[in-house]
């Protein structure tokens, strides 16, 4: 009698597969992602970005986003100079899209849940008010900037591994 391991059961169970994609998304955002507010004409535009050089990670991220029904885009920058690996960016952009993503993400524990919550609150505010660059929007932007600044310049786990192993 051949037993099935937990992975075999998970792959065949749509509910478990959904939870896998949610966990994957939260993990990749915690590890390689950012919650941002960037100026866009006369408004701030909310955005969730994930950057990585590994094509398989990008593929799995896009698969998870698609399976979760989250609109996203992939940006492949041009390679310059002597760079051997090209970082690819997956992003969710726009008030409705970011609101939908953060509504989902906030149902589960996350290392960046404060930032997800702030971006979610920003989206909720903007869906109610359409005032360009208000003081409240600028306060959201500054608060998120301060949260992200704590980690500015932090080395990625890959960089640390390469440094330790060499």
Image: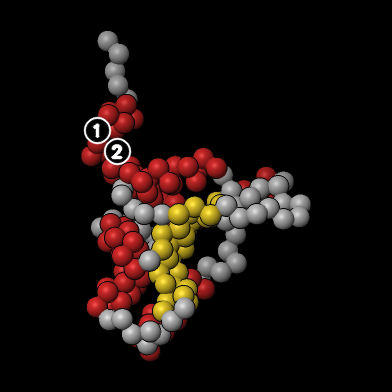
Q: Neighbour class for label 1 at 10 Å: few (<14), some, many (≥20)?
A: few
Looking at this view, name the residue that lies furthest to the bottom.
Answer: 135
Residue drawn at (29%, 32%) of the image? 10
Secondary-structure class at tag 2: helix
Quarter of the rendering containing residue 112: bottom left
Q: Neighbour class for label 2 at 10 Å: few (<14), some, many (≥20)?
A: some
Quarter of the rendering containing residue 119: bottom left
- Residue at image mark 2: 17
> Does 26 sit above or below residue 116?
above
Front one among 12 and 5 = 12
Q: Estimate the x, y position of residue 92 in percent, counting from the top left.
A: 41, 59
Looking at this view, name the residue that lies furthest to the right.
Answer: 82
Q: Estimate the x, y position of residue 128 in percent, counting from the top left.
A: 24, 78
Residue drawn at (60%, 67%) of the image? 153
Front one among 161 and 12 = 12
> Does 9 sit above or below residue 116?
above
Residue 165 is labelled as none
Q: Is residue 83 left or right of residue 128?
A: right
Q: Is residue 147 left or right of residue 68?
A: right
Looking at this view, name the residue that lies furthest to the front.
Answer: 41
Circles 1 and 2, Cβ within 8 Å, touching? The answer is: yes
Q: CA distance from mark 1 to mark 2?
A: 6 Å
- Residue at image mark 1: 13
* Count of numbered tags: 2
Looking at this view, name the residue that lies furthest to the top.
Answer: 1
Image quadrant for the N terminus? top left
Q: Is residue 122 left or right of residue 49?
A: left
Secondary-structure class at tag 1: loop
Q: Is residue 164 visible?
A: no
Q: Estimate the x, y position of residue 12 in percent, counting from the top left.
A: 27, 29
> Does 36 sit above or below residue 105?
below
> Does 122 sit above or below residue 72?
below
């Amino acid at each position: 009698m051949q037993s099935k391991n937990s992975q075999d059961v998970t792959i065949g169970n749509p509910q478990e597969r959904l939870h896998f994609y949610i966990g994957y998304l939260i993990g990749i955002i915690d590890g390689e992602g950012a919650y941002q507010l960037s100026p866009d004409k006369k408004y701030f535009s909310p955005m969730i970005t994930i950057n990585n050089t590994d094509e398989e990670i990008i593929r799995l991220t896009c698969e998870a986003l698609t399976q979760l029904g989250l609109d996203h885009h992939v940006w492949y920058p041009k390679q310059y100079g002597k760079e051997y690996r090209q970082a690819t960016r997956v992003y969710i952009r726009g008030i409705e899209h970011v609101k939908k993503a953060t509504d989902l993400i906030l149902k589960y524990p996350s290392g960046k849940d404060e930032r997800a919550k702030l971006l979610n609150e920003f989206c909720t505010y903007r869906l109610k008010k359409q005032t360009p660059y208000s003081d409240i929007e600028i306060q959201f932007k500054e608060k998120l900037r301060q949260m992200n600044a704590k980690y500015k310049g932090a080395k990625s786990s890959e960089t640390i591994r390469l440094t330790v192993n060499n």
